[in-house]
Image (tube, rainbow, N blue to C red):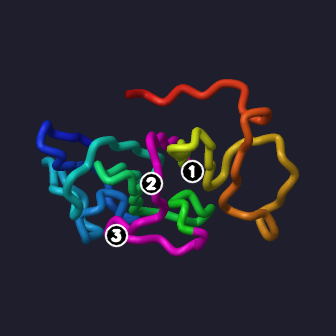
Amino acid sequence: LVLDNNGVAYAMGQNNHGQLGDGTFVPAKRPSKVILDNVKAIAAGSHHSVFLRTDGTAWAAGRNHYGQLGDRTLLSSKIPKKVMEGVSAINAKYDFSLFVLENASLIAAGQFDSGLPRNRTDWNPLQLFSESEVQLITIPT
């Protein structure tokens, strides 16, 4: 993922799950414009992408088999879909996404090692962590 100074996001690479957010499943050898404007931050997981717009909304595209897009479903998307409001920072890795809300709460979505009991069939794909549960998080600015 690449973000220019005008808030336009571009993506390149594999796209078998729609993770480039360009509305296709076609891999891109050159930067392809993401179907979203006014982007201020980008984050990439293994097969999904997360975008933070200047209005504080978070959007995501790509594979969602663990709920990593943060939309409370397991449905993948080849176009970015709005997943959250009131977001101040984002991050993504492997099969999970992190959203820091304007009230400083941390929301984690997807498969991650939180230490909380859950299994693949019954855990809620979106978990809210309080300050006492979060020891350290680094969100690049």
Q: Which residue is mark 3?
A: 78
Q: Earlier in the sequence, mark 2 or mark 1?
A: 2
Stretch in magenta: 72-94
Relative side of 138 to 13, left or right: right
Q: Quadrant of the N terminus?
A: top left
Give yes or no for residue 104 being in the magenta stretch. Answer: no
C-alpha separation, residue under disc 3 versus residue under disc 1: 16 Å
- What kind of residue is marked 2? His
**Left or right side of 43 for 25:** left
Q: In the rendered image, which quarter contains the C terminus?
A: top left
Residue at mark 3 to residue at mark 2: CA–CA distance: 11 Å
> At 16% across and 56% down in the image, what residue appears?
33
Mark 3 and mark 1 lie on one chain; the one further toward the N terminus is: 3
Q: Which mark is residue 95?
A: 1
Label 3 element class: strand
C-alpha separation, residue under disc 2 versus residue under disc 1 = 7 Å
CB of mark 2 within 8 Å of CB of mark 1? Answer: yes
